[in-house]
């Protein structure tokens, strides 16, 4: 695996950015700038990363192209298209986003997230994003979520089938799919299912941990890697079996110090697998 982090190190220059990432043995990361950035600067990031064998795993959009507000939806659609074009230009493994939500909070659960009409809109929007951007070297990928499509491997396969584009790939986040007691209790069985069904389509993964809270009713709390009860050893083995060059990005930590601490911990624990 290529261990990295979904964190844009703040630096004044691409060389400074890449040098700091390299100092902590980061081998994959997200692009720290977006499509509004001058292309000379973007090319600087490309070169700095390549010189240090750092893969740009993701160019994120993180917006709601399915928003009910037409202006929000239009702006999000443009962002998804332009970020996908940017990912293609730099040769990133993928441009990624969530599918989108049917209410005012872009990443929240609403019953309509699972309606037939909203699913149809989801498929059509993904198709339009890919067709408009027309990527040749990269993929558009949807991050799994606990409460919107795709919330299971079968839903992901259904989405891939219905979008029907060879430019749609899988971005995998197994902790996001820990949304039931059965999956949490039988983690290895569920990971086997996910990696078997999505084999050959996975282009980037997120790395985090989780734990079952001792409160009623069922509640899962996300945790830094190594501080929860998610079977991270088995997850690492599944990622390596899928593709030894697959990016695995730590995410959702709050400070640079926390990311560095997590990188050091994982590097020491899995040195032989990287």
Image (cartoon, rainbow, N blue to C red):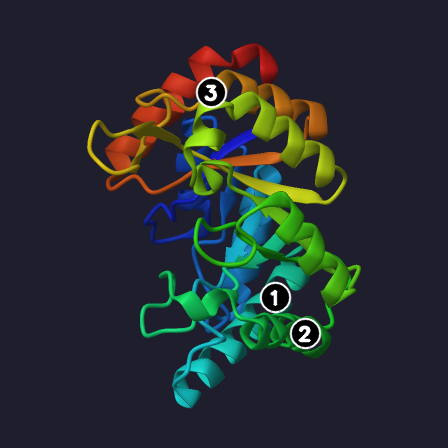
Visible residue check, residue 100: no
Q: Rounded to the nearest whole Å, what is the CA distance between mark 1 and mark 3? A: 32 Å
Q: Nearer the viewer, residue 9 or 222?
A: 222
- The residue identified by callout 2 is 133
* x and y percentages locating residue 239 in the rendered image: 62, 28
Label located before the other in sequence (2 or 3): 2
Vertical arrangement, residue 167 with respect to residue 153, above or below: below
Name the spot of residue 204 as percent of width and height, x first: 60, 42
Characterize the local packing of mark 2: few (<14), some (14-19) or many (20 or more) Cα atoms within 10 angstroms.
some
Which residue is more in the foreground, 66 or 242? 66
Query: Eyeballing the image, is 9 above or below 26?
Result: below
**Residue 81 vertical placement versus 175 (above, below):** below
- Of helix, strand and loop, which one carries label 1? helix
Alpha carbons under labels 2 and 1: distance apart = 6 Å
**Does the rendering let one see residue 9?**
yes
Residue 185, located in which quarter of the rendered image?
A: top left
Q: In this orientation, which residue lies closer to the viewer: 52 or 193?
A: 193
Left or right: residue 234 versus residue 124 is: left
Query: On the picture, is 101 further left or further right than 200?
Result: left
- Count the marks: 3
Judged from the image, the secondary structure of the residue bearing numbered disc 2 is helix
Marks 2,1: beta carbons within 8 A = yes
The residue that mark 3 highlights is 231
Disc 1 target residue: 84
Mark 1 burial class by Cα count in 10 Å: few <14, some 14-19, many 20+: many
Distance CA(mark 2)–CA(mark 3): 37 Å
N-terminal of the pair, mark 1 or mark 3, is 1
1 vs 3, front mark: 3
């Amino acid at each position: 695996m290529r261990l990295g982090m979904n964190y844009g190190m703040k630096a004044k220059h691409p060389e400074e950015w890449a040098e700091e990432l390299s100092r902590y043995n980061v081998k994959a990361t997200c692009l720290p700038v977006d499509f509004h950035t001058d292309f000379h600067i973007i090319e600087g990031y490309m070169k700095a990363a390549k010189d240090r064998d750092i893969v740009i795993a993701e160019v994120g959009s993180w917006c709601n192209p399915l928003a009910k507000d037409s202006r929000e939806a239009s702006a999000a659609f443009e962002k998804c298209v332009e970020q996908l074009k940017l990912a293609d230009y730099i040769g990133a493994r993928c441009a990624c986003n969530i599918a989108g939500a049917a209410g005012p909070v872009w990443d929240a659960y609403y019953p309509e997230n699972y309606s037939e009409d909203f699913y149809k809109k989801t498929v059509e929007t993904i198709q339009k994003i890919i067709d408009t951007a027309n990527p040749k070297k990269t993929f558009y990928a949807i991050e799994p979520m606990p409460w919107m499509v795709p919330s299971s491997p079968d839903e992901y396969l259904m989405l891939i089938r219905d979008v029907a584009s060879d430019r749609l790939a899988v971005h995998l986040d197994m902790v996001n799919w820990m949304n039931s007691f059965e999956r949490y209790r039988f983690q290895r069985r569920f990971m086997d299912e996910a990696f078997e069904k999505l084999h050959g389509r996975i282009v980037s993964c997120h790395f985090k941990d989780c734990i079952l809270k001792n409160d009623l009713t069922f509640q899962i709390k996300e945790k830094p890697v190594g501080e929860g009860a998610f079977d991270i050893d088995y997850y690492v083995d599944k990622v390596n079996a899928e593709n030894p060059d697959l990016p695995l990005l730590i995410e959702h930590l709050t400070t640079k110090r926390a990311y560095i601490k997590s990188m050091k911990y994982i590097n020491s624990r899995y040195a032989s697998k990287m």
